[in-house]
Amino acid sequence: MSDVLANAEEDDLWITLQIHPNIVAIADMKGLAGIVMIGGREPQEDTLEKAKKENVTIMLTKMPAFGLSGKLYAMGLSGTKDDAEGI
């Protein structure tokens, strides 16, 4: 979470194993596009409630982070805004 706090930028997508409500607070504070929970993890009930209240999108996948990141990259999404600009 500290890496997201320090480095995430507005509209980034957060891929994580974490399922607790603190991720919603961070996503909301940083203005992230959403949170993807990987590996078949399910959010805690209070995490869902907080996400609904804060209007933070949570998505779920059974894929591991590496596979999901590769698929997103193949679709044209890059890791950083600098990557997207060809820097």
Image: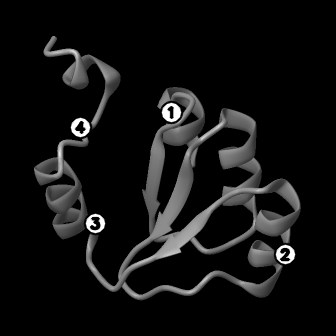
- Which quarter of the figure is the C terminus placed in? top left
**In the image, farthest residue toward the top:** 87
Depth check, mark 2 against mark 3: the one in front is 2
Label 2 amino acid? Glu
Quadrant of the image occupied by residue 29:
top right
Residue at 20%, 24% (x, y): give it: 83
The numbered disc on residue 65 is 3
Say few, some or many: other residues with alpha carbon within 10 Å of mark 2 (under 14 / 14 to 19 / 20 or more).
Answer: some
Residue at 72%, 57% (x, y): give it: 24
Q: CA distance from mark 4 to mark 1?
A: 13 Å
Q: Which residue is mark 1?
A: 8
Q: Regarding mark 3 in the picture, which secondary structure is present there? A: helix
> Is the C-beta separation of discs 4 and 1 under 8 Å?
no
Q: Which residue is mark 2?
A: 49
Residue at 61%, 74% (x, y): give it: 19
Say few, some or many: other residues with alpha carbon within 10 Å of mark 4 (under 14 / 14 to 19 / 20 or more).
Answer: some
Q: Which residue is mark 4?
A: 78
Residue at 71%, 84% (x, y): give it: 44
